[in-house]
Structures are given as structure tokens and as C-alpha cells.
Image (cartoon, rainbow, N blue to C red):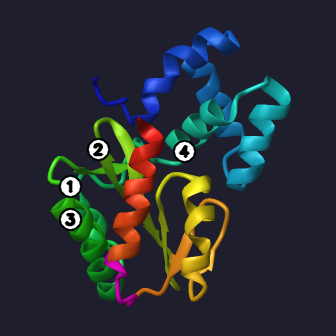
């Protein structure tokens, strides 16, 4: 399956078709909104022209100079964007998974590193300044393992771990195993 085109311009043909004007018209609308904040520009397009969130975001971000939604092409590029402790912890998490599951692919999806096995997302991670969020892509898996994660910040869809977390390999692999069982 071909990768989805991450460029903002990929939305332009459907914007023209759905909203009835050439892109030159929409660029003039955006010029009139120049100086407005991102949420105001999005709200204007959605409320006054019926734009979907995706189309509004594509037009606003393109008008602001962002030509692509893709920020990272490789996990290495992603790791260079986060702190050293975060990168070390995330690498350890993904190494544990790819060592146990050699068929696993470490990919960038939604600008975050993710593990795919047999076409299914089975584990992912993202970083903020204060912690790392990990997820086995399943609220049911998280709920099942929540009692084993009392020392972590467990939410419905993510698990917060410290930037310098001593990776619990058994826990990670058990969650991946449970996620893979769901995918069958």
C-alpha cells in the first residue's frame, strides 16, 4: 500500500471540489485572515465555509508556510528532536519489542515512532517535556495491565512513564503479546 501523501497540497483538489472555489480564492481568504491566530483561522473556515478540520488545517498550515504534515522521516530524526533520556528510553522500549519480534517494523506514523507487525500498529510512543507516553494501541490492553502499572500514570489510551524510566521489558512484551492477540 502506498504511503499517504503528507503534503498539505494533497488536500487542494478535494478542497476545490468540496467547497466550490479554486485554491486562488482560498489563498485570498487566508490573506484576509493574515495575523489571526491559528484557532481563529480554523474556526473561520469551519463556521463560515463548512470546512472539515483536516481541510481547514491543511489550508491554514500551508498559508503559514508549513508545506507538509511530516516532520520526521525516520526514527533517528525523531530521536534527535527529544531529550537524551527520552531517546534512550524509547530506543530501549523499541529494541525490546524488535528483538522479541524480528518481523516488527519501527516506523514513523503521526510524527511518532510506532511498531507495526503484520500491518497492525501494536505499540507507539510520544514525548513531551516531562514524560514519555506509550501505548499498545488498545484501551482494553491498557485496562488489563493497569494493576501492574500502579507506579505509572495510566490513562484510558496511554501510559505515562518517566523520561529516564527503567524499561520493564516483561510488561512491554506482555502488552504487545496481548495487542497481537486482539489483531488476529
Give the CA separation, mark 3 to mark 2: 20 Å
Closer to the camera in the image, 6 or 15: 6
Residue sitting at 56 percent across and 83 percent down? Answer: 152
Image position of 152 (left or right of 107) = right
Percent coordinates x, y for residue 32 in the rendering: 71, 38
**Residue 165 covered by magenta stretch:** yes
Percent coordinates x, y for residue 85 in the rendering: 33, 88
Dominant SS type (magenta) = loop
| Magenta region | 164-169
- Tags 2 and 1 touching, CB below 8 Å: yes
Closer to the camera in the image, 10 or 130: 130
First in sequence: mark 3 or mark 1?
3
- Tags 3 and 2 touching, CB below 8 Å: no
Residue sitting at 59 percent across and 29 percent down? Answer: 27
Residue highlighted by disc 3: 76
Relative to 19, is 125 above or below?
A: below
Give the crowd class for mark 2: few <14, some 14-19, many >=20 residues within 10 Å: some
First in sequence: mark 3 or mark 4?
4
Instruction: Name the element at disc 3.
Output: helix
Instruction: Name the element at disc 2.
Output: strand
Image position of 52 (left or right of 128) = right
Residue highlighted by disc 2: 117
- Tags 2 and 4 touching, CB below 8 Å: no
Label for residue 61? Answer: 4
Percent coordinates x, y for residue 38 in the rendering: 68, 52
Residue 110 seen: no
First in sequence: mark 1 or mark 4?
4
Relative to 63, is 153 above or below?
A: below
Relative to 59, is 153 above or below?
A: below
Labels 2, 4: front one:
2
Residue highlighted by disc 1: 101
Amino acid at each position: 500500500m502506498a504511503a499517504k501523501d503528507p503534503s498539505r497540497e494533497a488536500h487542494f483538489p478535494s478542497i476545490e471540489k468540496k467547497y466550490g472555489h479554486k485554491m486562488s480564492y482560498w489563498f485570498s481568504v487566508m490573506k484576509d485572515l493574515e495575523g489571526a491566530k491559528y484557532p481563529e483561522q480554523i474556526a473561520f473556515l469551519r463556521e463560515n465555509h463548512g470546512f472539515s478540520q483536516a481541510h481547514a488545517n491543511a489550508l491554514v498550515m500551508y498559508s503559514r508556510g508549513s508545506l507538509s504534515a511530516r516532520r520526521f522521516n525516520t526514527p533517528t530524526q525523531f530521536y534527535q528532536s527529544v531529550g537524551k533520556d527520552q531517546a534512550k528510553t524509547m530506543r530501549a522500549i523499541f529494541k525490546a519489542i524488535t528483538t522479541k519480534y524480528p518481523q516488527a517494523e519501527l516506523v514513523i506514523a503521526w510524527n511518532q515512532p510506532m511498531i507495526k507487525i503484520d500491518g497492525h500498529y501494536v505499540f507507539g510512543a510520544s514525548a513531551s517535556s516531562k514524560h514519555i507516553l506509550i501505548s499498545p494501541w488498545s484501551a482494553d490492553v491498557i485496562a488489563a495491565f493497569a494493576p501492574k502499572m500502579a507506579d505509572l500514570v495510566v490513562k484510558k489510551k496511554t501510559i505515562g512513564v518517566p523520561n529516564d524510566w527503567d524499561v520493564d521489558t516483561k510488561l512491554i512484551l506482555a502488552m504487545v503479546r496481548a495487542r497481537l492477540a486482539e489483531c488476529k
